[in-house]
């Protein structure tokens, strides 16, 4: 009997939890995982089983749940034995699992399409920044789809809510397009466009590597420490309002100092 047929038969008989664990082990030999599912109990554990069965058979979760719900109620035996309690399936949890399963499938499809369109992503010499940007691109795409669906539930009589809702749709869309531009530029030209802030460190490193040692010594011994001292005085001043921006500049200055010292160290100057 094929796995899908076994799952259908199991569901039509009422979706017994223990029987489901045994059925799961017929194709997945990970007894430790099966034991973890069993320890969750009949409610949470069954929800995990449903997700696994749906993934294996490609049957929608709702379809399996409907088969279980439609199963005949077990009859009490002549010896007055108590029939087992009906299996409870939380419909909200099933909807959540179905959404998660669909999200995973869509993410895999989208990632596959990206790797087909930009083959350099699978190569060893692909810049690390582009790999990181791909993850941000996928997340931005997910955010855009989610917020676009929620947009029509916005109270259109409230201008402020409309603006915020629109920004939540527009911002991830713009980010997605900006990252696509970076990827496409590298695909065509074989070099980094570098508009995204993720490339700031790379640009800075290239800049300092191109400088003479005497310039680096002056910058690390005088210019940057002087800037850091100024930032510290601003942070101590109670009248300063944009302290978050100053802290960000402070962190950047510290990063530049570390970078220059590493370059000097590689040149044998430290």
Image: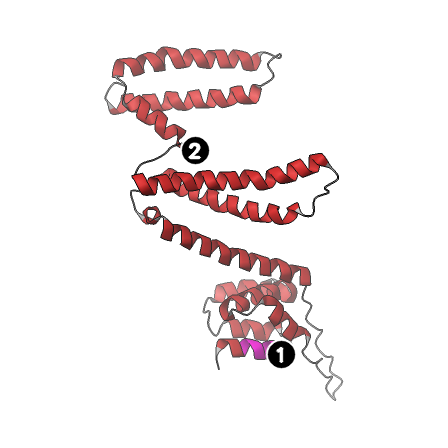
Q: How crowded is mark 1: few (under 14 residues within 10 Å), some or many (20 or more)?
A: some
User: Main SS type for the magenta part?
Assistant: helix
Secondary structure under the numbered disc 1 in the rendered image: helix
Residue 248 position within the rendered picture, expressed as x and y whole percent measured from the top left? 50, 23
Q: Which residue is under mark 1?
A: 12
- Indicate whether 103 appears above or below 6: above
Residue 11 is covered by the magenta coloring: yes
Looking at the rendered structure, which numbered label has been put on residue 196?
2
Segment colored magenta: 6-12
| Residue in the picture at 31% in, 26% down | 206
Residue 209 is covered by the magenta coloring: no
Q: Earlier in the sequence, mark 1 or mark 2?
A: 1
Q: Residues within 10 Å of mark 2 (few under 14, many from 20)?
A: some
Image quadrant in which you'd find residue 130: top left
Report the front residue among 46 and 59. Answer: 59
Residue 78 position within the rendered picture, expressed as x and y whole percent measured from the top left? 74, 89
Quadrant containing the C terminus is top left
| Residue in the picture at 54% in, 62% down | 36
| Residue in the picture at 43% in, 10% down | 226
Image quadrant in which you'd find residue 92: bottom right
Left or right: residue 142 versus residue 161 is left
Report the front residue among 198 and 40. Answer: 198
């Amino acid at each position: 009997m094929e796995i899908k047929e076994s799952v259908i038969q199991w569901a039509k008989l009422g979706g017994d939890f223990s029987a489901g664990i045994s059925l799961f082990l017929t194709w997945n030999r990970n007894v430790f995982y099966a034991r973890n599912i069993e320890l969750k109990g009949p409610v949470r554990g069954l929800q995990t089983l449903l997700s696994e069965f749906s993934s294996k058979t490609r049957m929608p979760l709702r379809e399996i749940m409907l088969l279980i719900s439609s199963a005949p109620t077990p009859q009490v035996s002549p010896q007055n034995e108590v029939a087992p309690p009906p299996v409870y399936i939380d419909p909200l949890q099933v909807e959540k699992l179905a959404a998660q399963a669909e999200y995973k499938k869509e993410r895999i499809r989208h990632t596959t399409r990206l790797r087909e369109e930009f083959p350099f992503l699978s190569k060893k010499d692909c810049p690390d920044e582009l790999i990181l940007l791909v993850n941000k691109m996928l997340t931005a795409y997910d955010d855009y789809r989610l917020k676009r669906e929620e947009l029509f539930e916005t109270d259109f009589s409230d201008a402020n809510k409309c603006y915020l809702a629109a920004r939540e749709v527009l911002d991830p869309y713009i980010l997605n397009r900006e990252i696509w531009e970076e990827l496409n530029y590298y695909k065509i030209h074989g070099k980094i466009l570098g508009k995204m802030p993720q490339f700031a460190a790379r640009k800075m490193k290239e800049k300092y590597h191109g400088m003479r040692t005497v310039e680096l010594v002056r910058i690390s011994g005088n210019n940057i420490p002087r800037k850091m001292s100024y930032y510290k005085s601003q942070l101590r001043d109670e009248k300063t309002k944009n302290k978050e921006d100053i802290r960000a500049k402070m962190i950047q200055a510290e990063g530049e100092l570390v970078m220059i010292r590493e370059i000097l160290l590689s040149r044998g100057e430290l």
